[in-house]
Image (spheres, helix red, strand yellow):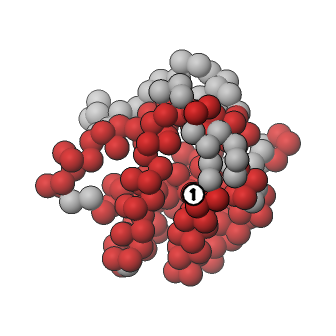
């Protein structure tokens, strides 16, 4: 477990949202979403990858990706909700990775939408995923982010980069 039991609830949400985008966007529409996808990969590379907690979120993403993908495919409502969140958060995350995260404030509407989405996943999830969602939400109530800038939320949730020059990944993954 992490020293000091760092709080990392919102990043699990990010992993879920990224999975939803990858799983629900038809190939014919993928070109339309490349900019949004690029923002999420930048979050992966620039926010998550350079921190221990961020790397843990990446691990959680891969651990639960199959289940989340199946849940998304089985529920058109969950697919729609996933895409709505992806596009809702894209401008704020873009500001964060472009160094303007201090200019964007986390609102109660943002938190409420994420909590509602997590409730819908929780209803359909396996006991293991339910437990993880429960623990993460209890560890760091999302309401604590309301009023913080995206940069302040990032520092609070994952901290500053430990390794400022991580090896980036790319999308689509290269076949090296």
Is residue 105 depicted above or below 46 in this figure? below
User: Is residue 19 in sight in this rendering?
Assistant: no
**Which corner quadrant of the image does residue 83 belong to?**
bottom left
On the image, which quarter does residue 141 sit in?
A: bottom right
135 to 15, vertically: above or below: below
- What percent of the width, then of the height, locates residue 171? 32, 38
Q: In which quadrant of the rendered image does the C terminus lie?
A: top left
Q: Residues within 10 Å of mark 1 (few under 14, many from 20)?
A: some
The residue indicated by pointer 1 is 110
Residue located 61% across and 43% down the image: 105
Seen from the viewer's position, the closer of residues 66 and 18 is 18
- Residue 108: percent from left, percent from top: 64, 59
Q: Residue at x 44, y 54 (%)?
A: 88
Query: Looking at this view, is 121 or 61 the one in front?
Result: 121
Residue 96 as seen in the image, left or right of residue 91: right
| Residue at figure coordinates x 30%, y 63% from the top left | 24
């Amino acid at each position: 477990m992490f020293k000091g039991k760092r709080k990392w609830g919102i990043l699990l949400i990010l992993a879920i949202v990224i999975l939803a985008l990858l799983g629900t966007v038809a190939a014919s529409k993928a070109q339309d979403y490349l900019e949004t996808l690029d923002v999420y990969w930048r979050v992966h590379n620039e926010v998550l990858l350079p921190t221990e907690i961020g790397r843990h979120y990446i691990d959680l993403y891969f651990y639960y990706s199959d289940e989340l993908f199946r849940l998304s495919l089985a529920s058109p409502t969950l697919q729609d909700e996933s895409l709505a969140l992806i596009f809702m958060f894209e401008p704020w995350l873009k500001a964060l990775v472009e160094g303007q995260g201090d200019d964007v404030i986390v609102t109660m509407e943002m938190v409420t939408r994420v909590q509602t989405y997590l409730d819908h996943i929780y209803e359909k999830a396996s006991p293991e995923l339910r437990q993880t969602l429960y623990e993460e939400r209890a560890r760091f109530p999302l309401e604590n982010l309301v009023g913080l800038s995206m940069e302040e939320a990032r520092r609070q949730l994952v901290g500053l980069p430990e390794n400022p020059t991580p090896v980036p990944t790319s999308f689509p993954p290269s076949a090296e």
